[in-house]
Image (cartoon, rainbow, N blue to C red):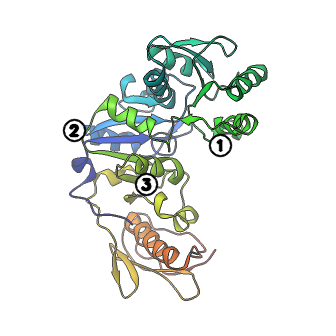
Amino acid sequence: MLASSDGPLAEAMDLAMLDLDGVVYVGRHAVPGAPAHLGRARATGMRLAFVTNNAARRPSEVAQHLRELGVDAGDSDVVTSAQAAAAVLSETCGEGAPIAVLGADGLRAAVSAAGLRPVDVADEAEAIVTGYGPDVRWRDIMRAAARIRNGLRWVASNTDGSFPADFGLAPGHGALVELVERFSGVAPTVAGKPAPPLLEETIRRVGGAHPLMVGDRLDTDIAGGAAVGVPTLLVLTGVTGLAELVSAEPTLRPTYLATDLGGLFEEHRAPTEEDGAACSGGWRARVGDDGVLQVSGDGGGSDWWRAVATAAWWHLDETGTPAAFDRLTPPDVGADRVEGSLRS
């Protein structure tokens, strides 16, 4: 369930580990207000780390993109799943070990930077690492799959099933992982979220005694934070909406919830229970006997979402069935009133 914070999050936590797409930017454009919020967070003394499951781009490329969007970001502020995968291999294989690389230049560069020796998939190697690459050839996929089936150690940068491309939603590296795993009967060691290595590598590189994971996806960002035992902040500027929230199992629920990165400057208060309703900042949410979410009151947008999510989770835990809902009309901050039943 949602928790209360000891002061604004930017003061209570000393490191924000930020997912990128859906949190800082959406495609080629910054999330409205995100650069200003991040600049304010830095001004409070909070460290910022930009974490991404994308293993294709080098950290310098990601940092340059962020700077073009008005976000103050250095190359060392970016941590990728390629770097996390290389760290896993460095620990297990040792300096200078030959590592077969199936992926883009960003993955090869990370392997080299970790003191390992990247080689082609057909060369002698102590392990193989795979990641998304738009120019990966089928013959290399076949060779890699055969070597993995024959016992070569395998580290996958991530298992993301899809990603947003210019032409629409496209298969991610997870599709390749699934194919190779089905053929070889071998499950890889995964470096990216929600597996622990990426966030562990981020904390090691950037530092921070009290880290906070900030993301827009429950199954990668929020689950990833939980996997390393750090509190999480879910922002609603990306893929998560009411349908995902009301059906979230306990392991996918965030510690804190806000409409956007402005939530870093709030002192969060967990919703309270009054006569069976979840109450937050003037909003009251409950699930009726018919299993339908009912919302009344007035207040800010983040408090609306907190009340609704809490009521839905109480219902889900008690009945095993997600609450039903209809027209999603959460208020903007300062909206006067939202009333009525929401049915899906």
Q: Is residue 74 visible?
A: no
Separation of residues labelled 3 and 2 (CA atoms): 21 Å
- Report the amino acid beneath label 2: Gly
Badge 1 marks a residue whose secondary structure is: loop
Q: Position of residue 134 (x, y in %)?
A: 68, 25
State the residue position of label 1: 161
Residues packed near mark 1 inside 10 Å, few (<14), some (14 to 19) or many (20 plus): some
Q: Residue at x 63, y 38 (%)?
A: 187
Tell me the crowding category of disc 3: few under 14, some 14 to 19, or many 20 or more residues within 10 angstroms, Cα based: many
Q: Taking 166 as reference, is 338 above or below it?
A: below
Helix, strand or loop at mark 2 = loop
Q: Quadrant of the N terminus?
A: bottom left
Residue 45 is labelled as 2
* Left or right: 6, with 70 as reference point: left
Residue hosting label 3: 234
Identity, as a three-letter code, of the amino acid under mark 1: Gly
Pick whichever of labels 3 and 1 is earlier in the sequence.
1
Gap between marks 2 and 1 measured at Cα: 36 Å
